Image (spheres, helix red, strand yellow):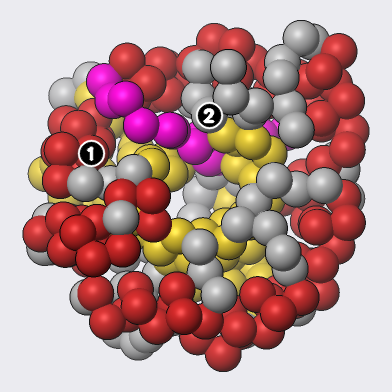
């Protein structure tokens, strides 16, 4: 059995780490390089770095910021935001990213997933999905442009299509849970892990130590991502890993 991963997420806006609730009301948290280095000391397994305004502002991801972070941090780094083509992926991988995450651009052009997987390998291509429950349809709906724009895509079907096209991992954020600290959306991740055979990373809603154990135990995800609880010092990664060990979950 593979060890479960604990993954802090840095949402970056113009070179600063920000955090909000339900994708709005962003607060400044600090410098991405300093924060990344601190998470490495705490024992994070990976780091996800999302340029949260690049797509909406129609600009490229900040390659120079990635280079600075990668020069200080020696754990796997996944970078997303503002990736529109294979050349953008190449630039980020050269800057020090280990994986590139595509979201809005993949919805607009699903071939991008396949093109990236063919050039760099599926292990380098993460399909990021922002999903929100639609009570009218009883299903999860995909949103793009930093959660600002709804699509007609069903999140579970889109996840399956993304994997078929070559995505080696899914990073799925529950927009309903984002920043609320009310626990992960267990039902969403249960549906995802039942539908695909690649690693699934859960994102959105973590507020307590028990939330990590719950999402690993009940939804069988491969990694749990969190931001607010780590950024504001409410939990440390070592606290989380010790609790998981106590609960019988295998961690690094």
Q: Is residue 127 left or right of residue 7?
A: left
- Which residue is denoted by mark 2 in the rendering? 222
Instruction: Point out residue 76 in the picture as x, y percentages from the top left corner.
Output: 61, 57
Q: Position of residue 147 (x, y in %)?
A: 36, 56
Q: Which residue is mark 1?
A: 163
Residue 14, image quadrant? bottom right
Q: Residue, x 34% and y 38% (percent of image)?
A: 132
Location of residue 120 with respect to 66 vertically, above or below? above
Is label 1 in a helix, a strand or a loop? helix
Secondary structure character of the magenta stretch overall: loop
Of the residues under marks 2 and 1, which one precedes in the sequence? 1
Classify mark 1: residues with Cα within 10 Å, few (<14), some (14-19) or many (20+): many
Q: Vertically, is 113 above or below 59?
A: above
Q: Which residues are magenta?
A: 195-208
Which of the two residues, 193 or 229, is positioned nearer the viewer here? Answer: 193
Left or right: 235, with 69 as reference point: right
Q: Secondary structure at mark 2?
A: loop
């Amino acid at each position: 059995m593979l060890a479960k991963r604990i993954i802090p997420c840095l949402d970056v806006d113009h070179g600063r780490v920000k955090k909000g609730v339900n994708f709005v009301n962003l607060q400044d948290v600090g410098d991405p390089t300093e924060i990344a280095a601190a998470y490495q000391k705490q024992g994070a397994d990976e780091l996800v770095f999302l340029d949260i305004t690049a797509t909406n502002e129609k600009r490229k991801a900040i390659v120079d910021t990635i280079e600075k972070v990668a020069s200080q941090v020696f754990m796997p780094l996944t970078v997303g935001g503002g990736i529109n083509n294979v050349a953008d992926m190449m630039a980020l991988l050269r800057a020090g990213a280990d994986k590139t995450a595509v979201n809005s651009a993949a919805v607009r052009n699903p071939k991008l997933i396949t093109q990236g997987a063919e050039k760099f390998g599926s292990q380098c291509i993460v399909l990021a999905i922002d999903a929100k429950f639609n009570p009218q349809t009883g299903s999860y709906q995909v949103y793009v442009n930093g959660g600002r724009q709804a699509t007609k895509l069903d999140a579970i079907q889109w996840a399956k299509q993304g994997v078929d096209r070559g995505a080696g991992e899914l990073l799925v954020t529950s927009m309903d849970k984002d920043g609320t600290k009310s626990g992960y959306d267990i039902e969403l991740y249960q549906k995802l892990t039942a539908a695909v055979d690649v690693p699934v990373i859960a994102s959105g809603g973590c507020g307590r130590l028990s939330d990590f154990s719950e999402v690993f135990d009940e939804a069988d995800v491969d990694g749990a991502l969190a931001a607010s609880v780590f950024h504001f010092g409410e939990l440390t990664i070592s606290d989380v890993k010790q609790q998981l060990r106590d609960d019988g979950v295998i961690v690094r």
